[in-house]
Amino acid sequence: MTTREHDASVYEQVQESSEFQELKRAFRRWTFPMTVAFLVWYLLYVVLSGWARGFMGIKLLGDINVGLVFGLLQFVSTFLIAWAYARHAERKLDPIADKLRHEVEEKTQ
Amino acid sequence: MSSTTLGMILFLTFVAATLAITFWASRQTKTAADYYAGGRSFSGVQNGLAIGGDYMSAASFLGIAGIIALSGYDGFLYSIGFLVAWLVALLLVAELMRNSGKFTMADVLAFRMSPRPVRTAAGVSTIVVSIFYLLAQMVGAGALVGLLLGITGEAGKAWTIVGVGALMIVYVVFGGMKGTTWVQIVKAVLLMGGAALVTLLVLGKFGFNLSGLLGQAAAVSGPKANPESFLIPGLKYGTEAQGLAGKIDLVSLGLALVLGTAGLPHILIRFYTVPTAKDARKSVLWGIGIIGVFYLLTLVLGFGAAALVGKDAIVAGDKAGNTAAPMLAQQIGEDIFGPVGGTLLLAFIGAVAFATILAVVAGLTLASSSSFSHDLYAHVFKRGQASERQEVVVARLSALVIGAVAIGLGILAQGQNVAFLVALAFAVAASGNLPAILFSLFWKRFNTAGAVSAIYGGLVSALLLVIFSPVVSGGETALFKTADFVLFPLSNPGIVSIPLGFLFGWLGTVLSKEYNAAKYAEIEVRSLTGVGAEKATEH
């Protein structure tokens, strides 16, 4: 067993390493803007539901109107973003995270 | 055989099966990790189903279908907020939390802070949010039983609440997280199956022509003067009559729905039931798929009920429309398979509705009792000196007490309009818990004062705003009809209380000098890489 101080210094070393910084950047550069994007897209939908009811009521196909399609697009965008995140995480995040985890676990054993 | 007898038989079958699961789970539950986190041994798919089972409450199943059946499009607004919210959980919370926490939400918050004040705040907030949510479900159960199983009168409803509460206590006390998770998995499969079956029958009746379904729904149940308005927003939330305040209220509700999910304690502890962060990711992906499909089904159920049962008949069954989905099941079953089909389908959907309530209340009881035992008892009262065995005993006892309190409050609140409690639970979670979680994970400078002020600040502002809102006093639909102490015009506090929660978190942080670089390095490295994450237990 190692002492807690030793652990802490290992964590600080990892935190400063260029690989960890790359992982952190790859995580934040994808998730932060995407979070802003889907929140804005969702709020746009809510605001249009409140203030642009004429627009939401425009019929596209029979009784299917803009409002319904807009709502269904929120489902589509949610599914797509979830899928894209999983792909990004598998390709860009998991390999670095796995490598760093193994390195730290070896050092602290 | 009547549908109520058949419904009762189906429901009792579900109860017998879940009790058998609970008995099996109780024999597998030995350590604290077993009780709190199901030994972290569930697969991503299993936990994804359980996430669906935990999240798709009677309010989403019966409530949203009912809102759509009576007010058309507006029910859809609710379900979209509930779904998009899962992206916050997926992108920012689930994996990092699995990597850095152990049993409760507070584990992540207390990681680099002074543990006692932070755990106290997180424990209080967890219990408050869960009790609100629990109370809404309990009162709903009492109201439903009269409609579905033909039990009427105050005494019958009270006994139903006692029965639901007793079952929920048994699941949690004996089954712990393992038993509760399996109950949620079974329920999720039944609920999806039932909703999909009725949806297919409805769509089949309309020759899979969605436009035809919508047109008939608007013609039968829309306002006589303007049937078209049934298919656009504005009949229930932010109506033109409510003016600007109503529309801002709509945005406020939307904010609470989309930001609340990732701060709900009973949802957060689900991420601990899988072996790794990758499984947590996989379970949220499955959860999003299941929940998304489910809300698409409720869209058809709601408009189907509007088209085939009709608003007048639904309102005669229940003013809030909660019986729209079961009534639709009976109608479509009868249309296609004759009276026996109608009876069968109604009985099945009724039993599914009860299974839904049971699974959700069990999840809530587990979350609040876990937090009481792990945060308040073990870390605050015992200062981290409690043994694992003591912790599990206290967790079981507190599940019993919380269950009893929920039964008592549920009986007292019978007949009250408590539907706002679900929205309030989301608002508190978004205003207090979410800022604390996000700041803990991503803000280097964040500290004890910041975490404590975010949680209490968000919690208290959301509560105060609701107390002084039109929900509680001053009107026919309010909790207290005769009093009037309205100071805040919106029914939903989110648009004010969520920014306030983040502001309190920031202010508390910068006013305190505390800062621990080494601990921040540890949580940052652990949360992103999974170093030192809790492992699954072996059996």
Image (cartoon, grey):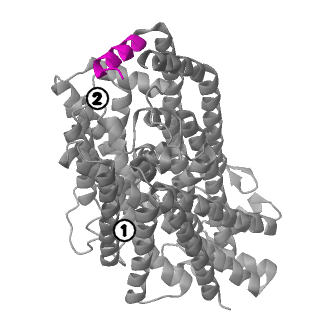
Tell me which numbered mark, 1 or 2, is placed earlier along the sequence.
2
* Relative vertical location of residue B232 with respect to residue B333 in this rendering, above or below: above
* Residue on which the image places disc 2: B112
* Relative vertical location of residue B162 with respect to residue A7 in this rendering, above or below: below
Verify CB contact (< 8 Å) between mark 1 and mark 2: no
What is the chain identity of the residue bearing mark 2?
B
Place of residue B445 in the rendered image (x, y in percent of width and height, measured from the top left): 27, 22
Q: Nearer the viewer, residue B475 or A15?
A: A15
Q: Residue at x 39, y 64 (%)?
A: B134
Any part of residue B437 in sight? yes
What is the chain identity of the residue bearing mark 1?
B
Alpha-carbon span between mark 1 and mark 2: 38 Å
- Secondary structure mostly seen in magenta is helix
Q: In this view, does B440 lie to the left or right of B37?
A: left
**What label sits on residue B418 in the rendered view?**
1
* Circle 2: element type: loop
Question: Is disc 1 surrounded by few (<14), some (14 to 19) or many (20+) residues within 10 Å?
Answer: many
The part of the chain drawn in magenta is A1-15
Q: Residue at x 23, y 54 (%)?
A: B464
Q: Which of B34 and B456 is in front in this view?
A: B34
